Image: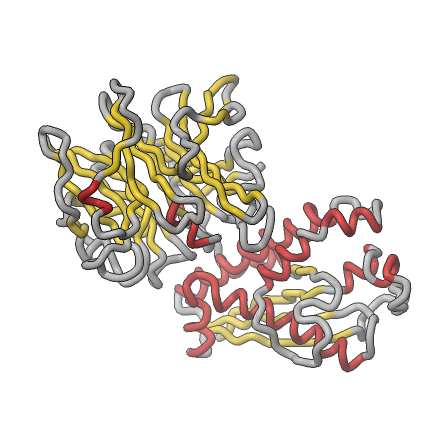
Amino acid sequence: MKNTIILLLLPFFVLSQEVLIKQLSDNINTNSAELNFVQINDSTAYFTVVTEKEGKLESNIYTTTFTNEEWGKKKYAEYNSDLFNTANIFFLEGGRTFLTACNNEMLDCKIVYLERHTKQGFSDIPVLSSDKSLSTQAFVSQHNSQRVLYFVSDRKGGFGGLDIWLSIIDINGNFGIPINAGDKINSPADEITPFYNKFDGLMYFASNKKEGIGGFDIYSAEGSLNLWKEPKNVHELNTNQDDLYPTFYDENNGYLTSNRNGAKFESIEYCCNDIFSFQYSEASLDTITTSSEIHDYLPLNLYFHNDEPDSRTMNITTNKTYKEAYISYFMMKADYEKQNPALNNFFEEILQQNFNTLNKVLDMLLFDLSKGNNMELQIRGYASPLHNPQYNQNLSQRRISSVINYLTQIKNGAFQDYISSRKLTITELPFGESNASEKVSDNANDKKNSVYSIEAMLERKIEIVDVILKE
């Protein structure tokens, strides 16, 4: 699913040093994936929605109108087709409308366009699709008097993965042969979602190269065509998740797509892109945090479903990450609330909020490490009294292992480098069931109390006890 989102491609807000980032309302964001929000005037915007129906993915373009200080409920746009999936719409002033067209399997994607003042229908761009390569995410810019189509492709001649390419449009509207945007923009990783911002003269795009903060990061670069200066990471827009599809409506306002904390999701593999707005301000907001502020969030408890991760094993490690365990657990919300109606919003107010807090703590920790500090992270693991003490001891160790896996995989392995160099040490303290309350049932035949009771749920956890600044 993630690769499909690339091809097409929490209420919640964030204050960063230069920008206010806010999640759009439920009128726009759903448990499906919402991508590529493009505002074309003061009251109209278009975006892409990817849904899953009967095991198949569908992508369509929707529109929304701005009324009463918010974007209204989405409406099915006129630019869709019964013949193929549509995505990534772009409007060229006074002329063509571009979009991505993909087959039912979402594996074959190409760029098509509509002439605004004719009834000709969708037109192909043969020069882009002649070699059967993928072409997607069209954006047309003008450099001096020259119009240029930027797009994303996996065609031969690139630097690896998906690259940003360009095609020069002549005075008659014909498209030139594809040209790679060059090694300043492209890398052996994936570069996607190009947007040339006419207000500051910079190309904005997303890349998952290893130097980034999260999965896909948003970058900007000065230049044009295939002559660019070294891209800069747009730190204020990025998180430790995927951030992509940057678009600007004016000098200070725009939108991005992200699966950052708070984004809605429906399943672990169909996760979790939403639309966020951003607004730059001339005022600089100081949000830099230090290790002393980490303690405001500690101790931090992270919870698990019964006998997870990796049930029915004596192993003390797992290949799963805590994010996987968290999402899997959250998807059981309806089952838990059916068994125990008195849970009092455990899943939203404790499980989800604590996962969001975990990412705040890790951001602070990485900031401290980047300043040359040596840090120690202390983690305790716990289990409910189901099963025997040795099994539960190993289970609590696996739970610690899942958190360490998450830590080492995010931010392109940045924490792993600090662990290898001993700049970050992790103290693991598996307690098993030794601290479990006597009120918690250990009767495997009484799942209502031994699995679904709030008392049992609160025992199945790890606890980030402390973060210590070492001399």
- Which is nearer the eye, 150 or 306? 150
Q: Is residue 223 visible?
A: yes
- Which is nearer the eye, 204 or 439? 204
Q: Is residue 279 visible?
A: no
Location of residue 125 (image quadrant)? top left
* Coordinates of residue 363 in the picture (x, y in percent): 48, 57
Residue located 59% across and 60% down the image: 324
Position of 101 with respect to 384 (left or right) is left
* Coordinates of residue 13 in the picture (x, y in percent): 52, 39
- Which is nearer the eye, 28 or 373? 28
Where 19 sits versus 173, above or below? below
Location of residue 312 (image quadrant)? bottom right
* Coordinates of residue 440 in the picture (x, y in percent): 87, 64
Position of 336 with respect to 211 (left or right) is right
Residue located 49% across and 48% down the image: 259
Residue located 67% across and 76% down the image: 397
